[in-house]
Image: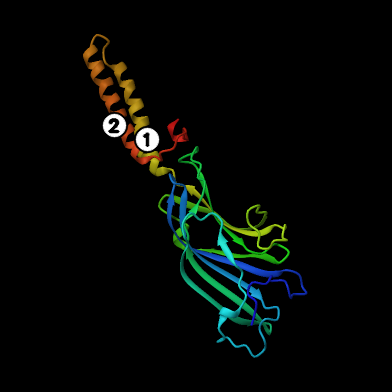
Amino acid sequence: KLDLNRKPGHDSKHGPKVVLFSCMINNLLEVNLIDEYFKPDLAILMDWMDDGELKKDWSLKRKTEDMWKPWMQFGNTIEKVEEVEKNTDVYSLRKRPVICSYRRVIPTLGQQMPLKQFPFDKLNLDAEIQFGWTTKELKIVAGEMEIDPKIRQLNEYVLIDHRIIVREHKYQYFTCYDDSSDPYPEVVMRLTLARNPWYYIMRLVMPQLLLSFMALTTFQVPAEEVVDRFSVSGTIVLSEIALYFIAVQMLPRVPYVMRIDL
């Protein structure tokens, strides 16, 4: 029986186990600017060559529960990860067995979202995945990152970049083995979104500019017509107050000044 808890490179003579990491972003279900989290629909695909676990008489129908799989977890999740689909299979590549692990998950991930440049800001949405083996035992290779077409043009955002970043990280609070002081591999699936500012420009900025120009009309009223001047100025002030209450409902409630406030 296979020891699923052993190090992945324990019996290998070729260095660490190499795992190809690919993913697809099916949808972006929610982006919460105030509570600073987002909820993507992710499909994760990992492929790795077998190092002797599978014998020649193993077939594709053999139960995959006995196979070693890269243990992984989301590093920035704030709720329990919802797992939609999970599957492991084996296929042949150049007469060598390759194990393929597929997982579709919907996590709720925390992410800092600075809004000082709002509504001309850009957001980096990172899904951080950590693995339970060190870089000496497990090597992650970045594969393809596919994006569903509906994400490329969202209502409020425009996708300008997407990439898979493989990096190393040392954890002072988490080690897989007692004698391990090596860094652990970490994968970051990053979506870079740019906000479409025209919604706020047409509904907040342009009315504000129009009211500012209308304030100049008070100089067209004769100086002796004091009541009429106050009437025009008062109407503009009331319009500004009404626009302010509308803006409060539309803008994110943050404790600092944003670009649109200026």
- Vertical comparison of 28 with 115: above or below: below
Quadrant for the N terminus, please.
Answer: bottom right
Give how far across and how far down residue 170 sits, in percent: 67, 54
The answer to whether 44 appears left or right of 11 in the picture is left
Q: Amino acid at mark 2?
A: Ala
Between residues 220 and 257, which one lies in front from this camera angle?
257
Element at label 2: helix
Is the image coloured rainbow, by chain, by secondary structure, or in one colour?
Answer: rainbow
- Vertical comparison of 1 with 9: above or below: below
Q: Which residue is mark 1?
A: 206
Q: Amino acid at mark 1?
A: Met
Q: Residues within 10 Å of mark 1 (few under 14, many from 20)?
A: few
Residue 242: which disc? 2
Element at label 1: helix
Which residue reaches farthest top? Answer: 224
Residue at x 66%, y 52% (from the top left corner) = 172
Distance, label 1 to label 2, CA atoms, is 15 Å
